Each structure stands twice: as C-alpha cells, then as structure tokens.
C-alpha cells in the first residue's frame, strides 16, 4: 500500500529541508523523483544521492515565480520519466513573525501569494492531464499550521497558506472525477533552516509547553505524511488537511 514503483513524482523546493526529505522518502518507496529547486546545485545534490542509493532521480532548476519555469518543470518530468503521477507543492516563502502589517507593501503581499498560492495552482493545472492519462494522480501541498493559528506579524503568510488549504479542498471536487486526489500537509514547528533563523531556546520552551509530543518536528515527520498521501494507502482520501504538529500548537509570540 506504500509501494510507488513505476510512479513519477515532482517536488518543488526539493533541494533541502522538507522538500529534500520528501524526495528521499518517495524515492525509497520506488518512485522516480524529479527534484526541482531554485538552486540547481542543491537539486542536483539530492538527485545524485538518490541515484547513489539505487533510486531514480533527475534534477531541474525551477523558480516558481516564473510561469515558464513551471511549465518546463512538468515538461521535463514527462520527457525524462514519461509522465507525472505525484506532485508535491513544497516551495514556499514568508512567515517567521516578520510581517509587520504597517511595514510590508503590496509588492510583498503579491509575491507571497504568487509563491504560496498561484504557483501550486498552476502546477496542479499543468500536471493534472498527465495524471489523468496515466490513471494515477496525487497532489500534496505543503501548507502550514500558520494557516489555522492566530499570531502577530503573520497575516500574509498565514492567510496564503489558508488559501492553499481551501484551494485543495475545492479542487478535490474538480479533480476527483479525473482520478486525482489532492491533499495538504500542514507542518507545525519543524527543524528546518527557516525555523533556525528565528528559533531561540526561550521560543522553543514556549512552543513545547503546548506540544503533547514534547519535541519539535523533524523533516522526516513531515515527509512521512507526504508519503501517506502519495501512496495507494490513501486512495479514498482527498480534499483533506493533515496537521503534523505533535498534537499541539506552536506559535511565535
């Protein structure tokens, strides 16, 4: 039920963090993985490590703000491995409690929504026909616990991720008849480079005070949820958002 042999996965932002862990777990389950990242060097490093471990992988540069890059990403996957069965919309931007509503401007807001909402929507649109033709399709959006939390200086990031949640729950109705499932994984506070830029011992202590599983998340925790949604075991699951957060709430005060 977790076997992805013969399937082709595309992962955005796959060069490190949650994206890298998702690439690795999908490859370990048998999928051929297209690792895309704005840094070709990072993407290539992940693809090389997958191949060295006996898997199938290829790297491609992709700036998700560039519509041509998004189209090229799907074309590259089809040309390299024959189709697209799994899409992980992981690339994202924003958050960290840095969005003072009186200091950000419209350009910032548009950029965050372009990366966190428009790019996943466009990739879904581009990948869906190939998924339908192949007879297997699963789309996984990496959203955020911020999509349901209430925190200061997080309004734009949080609302963009909430939009991504709702986008998927509605697209499930459009894509279901095509044989395509679409779901979201909402990470809680997970040990990534992005979190390390704001995390202090004091902040971590506050987060863990409201976390029943008393630790922060690891990228492997999020990748496990990605595998669940990508694999046949979740064949009757679509339009859902799964929060992976240790059973609690971690916010930036």
Image: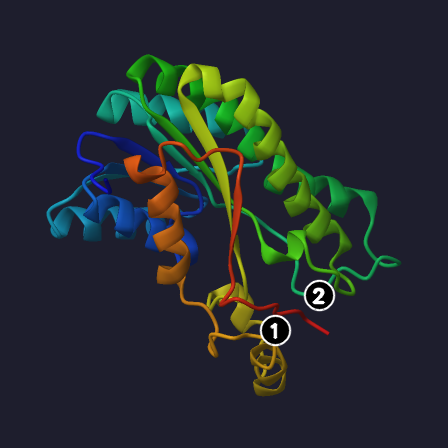
The N terminus - image quarter: top left
Q: Is residue 1 above or below residue 16?
A: above
Q: Is residue 1 above or below residue 216?
A: above
Q: Residue at x 58, y 85 (%)?
A: 205
Q: Residue at x 61, y 41 (%)?
A: 165
**SS label for mark 2:** loop
Nearer to us in this view, 192 or 247: 247
- Rendered location of residue 162, percent (x, y): 67, 45
Q: Residue at x 72, y 64 (%)?
A: 98
Specify whether residue 16 is in view: yes
In the rendered image, which residue does mark 2 sit on? 97
Left or right of 95: which side holds 150? Answer: right
Q: Residue at x 43, y 15 (%)?
A: 178
- Rendered location of residue 44, percent (x, y): 29, 47
Left or right of 101: which side holds 227? Answer: left
In the rendered image, which residue does mark 1 sit on? 198
Q: Is residue 20 above or below residue 87?
A: below
Specify whether residue 60 is in view: no
Q: Which residue is situated farthest in the front direction here?
A: 236
Marks 2 and 1: in contact by CB < 8 Å?
Answer: yes
Nearer to us in this view, 41 or 229: 229
């Amino acid at each position: 039920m977790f076997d992805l042999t013969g399937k082709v996965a595309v992962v955005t932002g796959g060069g490190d963090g949650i994206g890298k862990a998702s690439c690795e777990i999908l490859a370990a389950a048998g999928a051929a993985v297209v690792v895309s990242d704005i840094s070709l060097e990072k993407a290539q490093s992940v693809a090389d490590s997958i191949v060295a471990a006996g898997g199938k992988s290829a790297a491609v540069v992709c700036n998700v703000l560039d519509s041509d890059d998004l189209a090229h990403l799907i074309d590259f996957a089809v040309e390299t491995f024959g189709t697209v069965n799994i899409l992980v919309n992981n690339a994202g931007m924003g958050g960290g409690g840095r969005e003072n509503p009186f200091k950000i401007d419209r350009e910032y807001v548009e950029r965050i929504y372009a990366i966190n909402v428009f790019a996943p929507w466009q990739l879904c649109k581009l990948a869906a026909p190939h998924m339908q033709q192949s007879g297997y399709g699963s789309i996984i959006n990496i959203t955020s616990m911020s999509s349901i939390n209430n925190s200061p200086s997080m309004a734009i990031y949080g609302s963009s991720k909430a939009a991504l949640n709702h986008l998927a729950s509605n697209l499930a109705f459009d894509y279901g008849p095509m044989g395509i499932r679409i779901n979201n994984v909402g990470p809680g506070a997970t040990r990534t480079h992005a979190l390390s830029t704001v995390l202090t011992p004091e902040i971590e202590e506050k987060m863990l005070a409201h976390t029943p599983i008393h630790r922060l998340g690891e990228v492997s925790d999020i990748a496990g949820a990605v595998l669940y949604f990508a694999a046949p075991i979740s064949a009757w699951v679509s339009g859902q958002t799964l929060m992976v957060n240790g059973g609690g709430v971690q916010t930036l005060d």
